[in-house]
Image: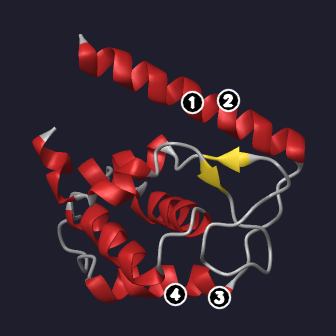
């Protein structure tokens, strides 16, 4: 749990369901009908632990989209994505990730609107996320 100390408490609080942003809304938490979506466990794992070589760009993009969708500011998102990239192993002989890479990922995705979820897709996403969070909490409590 010590590795989670650098993650802001307010961000961790977003693991609880929050309103998803609809296409065209500002970065503040918005709505998608009456459906609320939580911040994904995958994003938390990426930021807290990093990910293996070969998964880093895809997971950084996914975490960025998730953070922006729940209303995290672009600046805070850059900090969190950079943290995940820093915690990821670097491939020998290749240019390492930089903070500028994290900024490019975040600001590029911030400019493009996320695709709208259909209510059925949103409901499935929420159910799967809640199930994963419960499973992780059960493992960590034991």
| Residue 130 placement, left or right of 106 | right
- Identified at 38% across, 25% down, the residue is 136
Asked if labels 1 and 4 touch by Cβ distance under 8 angstroms, the answer is no
Q: Residues within 10 Å of mark 2 (few under 14, many from 20)?
A: few
Q: CA distance from mark 1 to mark 2?
A: 5 Å
Among the two numbered marks 3 and 1 on one chain, the one whose residue lies closer to the N terminus: 3
Tell which tag, 3 or 1, sits nearer the viewer.
Answer: 1
In front: 13, or 3? Answer: 13
Q: CA distance from mark 4 to mark 2?
A: 29 Å
Quarter of the rendering containing residue 102:
bottom left
> How far across and down, in percent of the image, does residue 22 sit?
78, 68
Reading the image, the residue beneath label 1 is 130
- Identified at 15% across, 47% down, the residue is 3
Reading the image, the residue beneath label 4 is 107
Tell which tag, 2 or 3, sits nearer the viewer.
Answer: 2
Quarter of the rendering containing residue 56:
bottom left
Among the two numbered marks 4 and 1 on one chain, the one whose residue lies closer to the N terminus: 4
> How far across and down, in percent of the image, does residue 41 sit?
46, 41
| Residue 129 placement, left or right of 7 | right
Q: Residues within 10 Å of mark 1 (few under 14, many from 20)?
A: many
Asked if labels 3 and 4 touch by Cβ distance under 8 angstroms, the answer is yes
The numbered mark at residue 111 is 3
Q: Which part of the image, by quadrant, shows the C terminus?
A: top left
Q: Which part of the image, by quadrant, shows the N terminus?
A: top left
Asked if labels 2 and 1 touch by Cβ distance under 8 angstroms, the answer is yes
Tell which tag, 4 or 2, sits nearer the viewer.
Answer: 2
> How far across and down, in percent of the image, does residue 129 sit?
58, 35
Reading the image, the residue beneath label 2 is 127
Does residue 6 lie above or below 124 as drawn? below
Q: CA distance from mark 2 to mark 3?
A: 29 Å
Asked if labels 3 and 2 touch by Cβ distance under 8 angstroms, the answer is no
- Identified at 52% across, 87% down, the residue is 107
């Amino acid at each position: 749990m010590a590795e989670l100390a650098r993650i802001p408490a307010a961000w961790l609080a977003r693991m609880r369901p929050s309103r998803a942003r609809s296409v065209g809304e500002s970065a503040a938490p918005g709505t998608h009908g009456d459906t609320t979506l939580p911040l994904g466990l995958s994003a938390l794992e990426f930021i807290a632990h990093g990910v293996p070589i070969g998964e880093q760009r895809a997971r950084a993009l996914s975490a960025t989209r998730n953070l922006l969708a729940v209303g995290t500011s672009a600046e805070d998102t850059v900090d969190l994505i950079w943290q995940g990239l820093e915690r990821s192993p670097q491939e020998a002989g290749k240019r390492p990730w930089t903070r500028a890479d994290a900024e490019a990922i975040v600001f590029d995705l911030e400019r493009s609107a996320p695709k709208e979820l259909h209510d059925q897709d949103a409901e499935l996403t929420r159910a799967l996320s809640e199930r994963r969070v419960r499973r992780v909490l059960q493992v960590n409590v034991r």
